[in-house]
Amino acid sequence: MGTNIKEDFLQSKEYVVKTEEFEDLSEAMSDGNCKKQIEDSLLADPDNCGMCGGLLVVPRMLHCLHVFCEECLDKKLVTDGGDASSINASIICPTCCHSTLVGTKLLAALPLDVTKTNISDVSNSVTLHCTSCTAKEVAKSRCSTCHNLLCNNCDTAHHFMRCFESHKVVALDDMRKDGAKITVHKPLECDFHRGENIIYNCTTCNMTACGECVKTEHKGHKCEGILDSETRVRQEIESLLSKSKIKIEQLAKASSNLDSNLEELAHQRSSARDLINESYQSYKAVLEKCRDEILEELNKLYHERELKIMKETDELGKTINNMEDACKYTSRLLENGTIPEMMYLRKVVASRLIALNSKSPKFEKNYLVEFKSDLEKFGFVIKNNFGRFVTESDIVVKNTPTILPDLPPLNINGVTNPVPALITNGCNGPPVANSSPISLPTSLQSSIDSDIGNSLQTLMAQSPPIPHVNSNALQGFSSIAEYNLQQLATLAETNNSAATSPTATFNIADLLTNDTAYKNLASLAKLGLNAAGTTNPPSIPRSNKVSPMQIRCKFGQLGPSKGQFNSPHGFCLGLEEDIIVADTNNHRIQVFEKTGTFKFQFGIPGKDEGQLWYPRKVAIMRNTGKYVVCDRGNERSRMQIFTKNGHFLKKIAIRYIDIVAGLAVTAHSEIVAVDSVSPTIFIIGESGDLHRWFDCSDYMREPSDIAIHGKEFYVCDFKGHNVVVFRDDGQFLRRIGCENLTNFPNGIDISDAGDILIGDSHGNRFHVAVFSRDGSLISEFECPYVKVSRCCGLKITSEGYVVTLAKNNHHVLVLNTLYIL
């Protein structure tokens, strides 16, 4: 191609670095991944060298089709190859790590990227001449296929001659109007004969040649003109390109499947870990039940034998007393009686003594109550019945591995690159099934094969002892509020000095007369207060102690059958504290007892009145027991009223609501609905009339649930990490909670005592924070035994059981009693 390639290239290129690109790179350098971002920016620009970052100068192409500056490749060759003159000299591509063998020819063995070296920008030229013919007439258009400027005659030929029917011609005036760059390609010179243009293609050697080459090196070979070979070569390359793109799509899909498998593997590990912990807690409950039964049996055995011993002791005592009395009388008779008297009474005395001597009470020689256990056998049984892993190797029917269609080997410059045709669903193993890499039983009962497992179903309703306040713990307190004050005072004293034990004797008078405790309590209460109108609530002091909540009952799983759910979005408690669930994707409402026992269901899929179409929220009217259900219907939102037995009554049009995020009913049977898209609260009468509404978008970002207490509305702000309190006329009152304490709240309820329970499932754990009405934190609870994904709603029963709905886990959780009532 000549010895002055570098000079020609520099003259034909604007060797200018774009300021904007370097500004982008300098911004990227401020990030932690600046190096990678710089490399990605360089490689993404085809005019930049991926090694030095500048515009390509004398671009040489490696066999992997990546292009770099000749000077950069020369440094790479010396650095990586050692002896650059070696016959095995090669260059490792810094982009894809592909090795290109250059041998003794070194960089001369690499082809120039002629698409860059032979191009000239003529956009600013005043007069452009035709490059397609020798007439040198003024050009009027440009062919995007053969890259020639066309005069009027050549333009006409391109439009009407069959050999040019696939060529695309664009007028130069149109290109200038669109601001497009006008370029021309210089003729391609022969590498061996300077000044000779390449015009032939030698099909024998599969390489291009000039006229001199055809006469010498390629004499006798089958040569044809380049233009004659264009259609065939273009079709071949386009065919390879099309197949390569298909192959990329298939490989990308396979990569996506591997990514999904990796995510699923992580999810399965998390689920398995949770189930192991849950199994441990359940087995622990079984062991505690066994312990209690054994201790009860021990007491029974002891009392049985105790009664026998006491009975024997009593009989023995009576016998001794009788014999002592008989001996005393006989002794007096012998000492004081006359012979006639003795002879007169001897028969009776002798008979009594003989009877007493002949009838001695019978006793058990030894009583034995001994407990024996076989720890080794027990450990063996537990280990073999605790549970087991099911992996892909346990699956009998395996899916067929993904087979990509075989592509013909690519032959470029004599180098054949075979393409593998088999993609497996694993890193280093055989093809596996599409099932999750680790799968476990969905219920604990199915994983237990021993006698312990057979009794587990009846024991699941019973949970291990949990730290909650019972009647004994409340002794000495006049009310729950007084007990809560004790907990708050204990928290204050713990954070400042020697803590007062939570179980220590305490009454309200002691709190008010204890100066230190009173000051700590007052300070803590002030920190928790949130004045009305405050935009950002102050930080709330937290206790380091988060009390655990134990699972009292868990029911439901993915499915369409009774007692199963499919992404349920809402629930409420009925008049008898039944759990009413809006089974969203199953298009129905299901009613359960608090124990999880299925009672009945109503609703069939459909958009007509009386049918249900993705019901999201359900509430109950306390005075009549009627159900209020919000679903989609034919509109954005629809509200329907059903009887307590599930019979349809009426429809209420709520087209003004996008998505109902919270639903509640006041004591006066007014229906309160919250729109999450445009945060607004609507108050609707039972007749369907819109009584009033107020916009709350200035105070919150995304409502997620609502609770009503008197004339106050408590609305969870999911993205605001708190609860916003409004009066029923729309006046803003205060905020409760803050980030890191009530993260993404999605459920709220208020106890009879006025305590506010706010639930969230941030971090896949169900967490409850309890506040007083003024926003002071009282306590925190968390369930560590099961992970939940996106809980919806929170309700507290009359016993203090906390109920929530795990939407993505498709089940209902009932957690053990808290001290809040």
Image: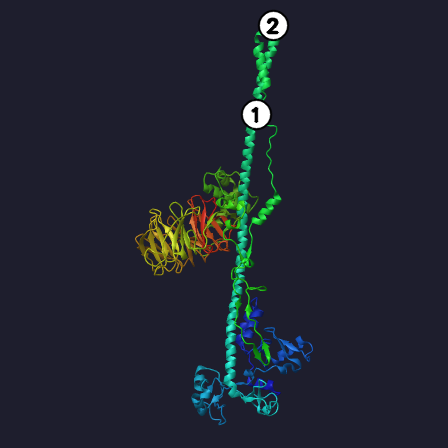
Is 752 located above or below residue 389 in the figure?
A: above
Classify mark 1: residues with Cα within 10 Å, few (<14), some (14-19) or many (20+). Answer: some
For mark 1, give the secondary structure. helix
Task: Residue 160 in the image: state x and y as whole percent.
Answer: 42, 89
> Coloring scheme of the render?
rainbow
**What's the residue at 58%, 70% (across, down)?**
35
Q: Amino acid at mark 2?
A: Ile
The reply to whether residue 714 is in sight is: no
Task: Residue 490 in the image: state x and y as whole percent.
Answer: 52, 44
Disc 2 designates what residue? 339
Looking at the rendering, in which quadrant would you find the N terminus?
A: bottom right
**What's the residue at 57%, 9% (across, down)?**
345
**What's the residue at 49%, 92% (across, down)?**
133
Q: Amino acid at mark 1?
A: Glu
Disc 1 designates what residue? 312
**Callout in the foreground (2, 1):** 2
For mark 2, give the secondary structure. helix
Is 275 located above or below residue 179 in the figure?
A: above
Residue 20 lies left or right of residue 193; in this view the side is: left
- Marks 2 and 1 sit apart, C-alpha to C-alpha, by 40 Å
In-front residue for pair 397/26: 397
Residue 535 lies in quadrant: bottom left
**What's the residue at 60%, 84% (across, down)?**
6
In-front residue for pair 185/102: 102
